[in-house]
Image: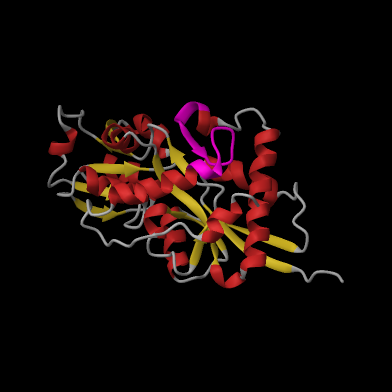
């Protein structure tokens, strides 16, 4: 009996660690059987919002957002983005003050989205800010133009802000590690629960195979995130899914009750544990 073909919409950001993970899957380098993946690229806050509406079968999301998504989506064990002493960066036109954390109070800060992990950690760093949501790729120009006192950068802006004349005030991943001793769990991949256990497991295997192929057959510059930035996708050269699962849980536990933001308890799903062996 021939398995029926199934089209699966898979969404992720254009960042380098997502490109690392999904390139083999998007270029037909792995056998996915009857499953055909349609890839969609969007900024992470747009994906967070679409996941809230249940529009995508598989998508990257911020771990902050996942607290609002756990009933509809299961967190996959492979493909989490973890900042090891590195994370979203707070930048400004002015030179960094002696105490950036205190100096930020009352300032207007451009952020990439209220459901991003970056925003959650910023609120932990300094709750007394005024924030404005700006597309992630427009924050540097927004701050350089004087429309905000500071900006919270994710993706390539973390590397290019100095070219716009912006000064680094604080690295949220570095601050988080000093505070907790933990890497910063930033995002992960989720699969919609209504697909059913069998298809969810097949998707988990496909994603794991995509990451493994890229890890085992790297090209020049392929592991830029690991070497240059200290940011890595779990299951890739720098780590494994089990470690990412533990770190995501520790991040949730460490942030609970600190931020004043909406809180939800997120238990490790049995599916996530099973997908480690997919």
**Scheme of colours in the image:** secondary structure
Left or right, 118 with reference to 259: right
Q: In the depicted view, which residue is nearer to us: 16 or 58?
A: 58
Q: Residue furthest right?
A: 1
Q: Residue at x 42, y 53 (%)?
A: 62
Q: In the depicted view, which residue is nearer to us: 156 or 79?
A: 79
Left or right, 127 with reference to 43: left
**Quadrant showing the N terminus:** bottom right
Q: Position of residue 223 (x, y in %)?
A: 57, 31
Is residue 47 magenta-colored? no
Left or right, 181 with reference to 146: right
Q: Is residue 229 above or below residue 109?
A: above
Q: Position of residue 116 (x, y in %)?
A: 36, 53
Q: Residue at x 42, y 48 (%)?
A: 248
Q: In the depicted view, which residue is nearer to us: 264 or 59?
A: 264
Count how many numbered circles sit on residues in the image: 0
Q: Position of residue 47 (x, y in %)?
A: 47, 60
Q: Residue at x 57, y 66 (%)?
A: 57
Q: Position of residue 101 (x, y in %)?
A: 18, 37
Q: Is residue 76 above or below residue 126?
A: below
Q: Is residue 243 above or below residue 252?
A: above
Query: Is residue 111 in view from this perspective?
Result: no
Q: Which residues are magenta?
A: 227-243
Query: Is residue 276 in view from this perspective?
Result: yes
Q: Residue at x 61, y 70 (%)?
A: 195
Left or right, 67 with reference to 218: left
Q: Determine which quarter of the picture holds residue 221.
A: top right
């Amino acid at each position: 009996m021939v398995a029926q073909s199934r089209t699966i919409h898979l969404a992720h950001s254009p960042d380098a660690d997502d490109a690392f993970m999904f390139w083999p899957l998007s270029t037909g380098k792995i056998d996915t059987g009857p499953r055909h993946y349609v890839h969609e690229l969007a900024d992470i806050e747009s994906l967070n919002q679409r996941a809230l509406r249940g529009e995508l079968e598989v998508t990257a999301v911020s771990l902050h957002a996942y607290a609002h998504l756990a009933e509809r989506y299961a967190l996959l064990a492979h493909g989490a983005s973890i900042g090891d002493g590195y994370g979203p960066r707070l930048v400004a036109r002015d030179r960094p003050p002696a105490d950036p954390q205190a100096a930020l109070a009352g300032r207007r800060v451009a952020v990439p989205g209220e459901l991003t992990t970056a925003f959650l950690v910023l609120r932990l760093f300094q709750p007394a800010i005024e924030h404005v949501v700006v597309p992630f790729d427009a924050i540097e120009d927004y701050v350089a133009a004087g429309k905000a006192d500071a900006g919270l950068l994710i993706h390539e802006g973390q590397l290019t802000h100095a070219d716009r004349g912006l000064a680094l005030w604080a690295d949220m991943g570095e601050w988080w590690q000093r505070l907790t001793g933990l890497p910063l769990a930033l995002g992960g991949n989720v699969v919609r629960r209504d697909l059913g256990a069998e298809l969810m497991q097949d998707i988990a295997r496909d994603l794991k195979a995509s990451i493994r192929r890229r890890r085992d057959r790297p090209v020049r510059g392929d592991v830029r995130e690991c070497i240059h930035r200290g940011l890595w996708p779990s299951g890739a050269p720098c780590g494994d899914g089990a470690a990412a699962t533990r770190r995501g849980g520790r991040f949730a536990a460490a942030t609970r009750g600190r931020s004043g933001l909406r809180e939800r308890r997120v238990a490790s799903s049995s599916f996530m544990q099973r997908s480690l062996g997919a």
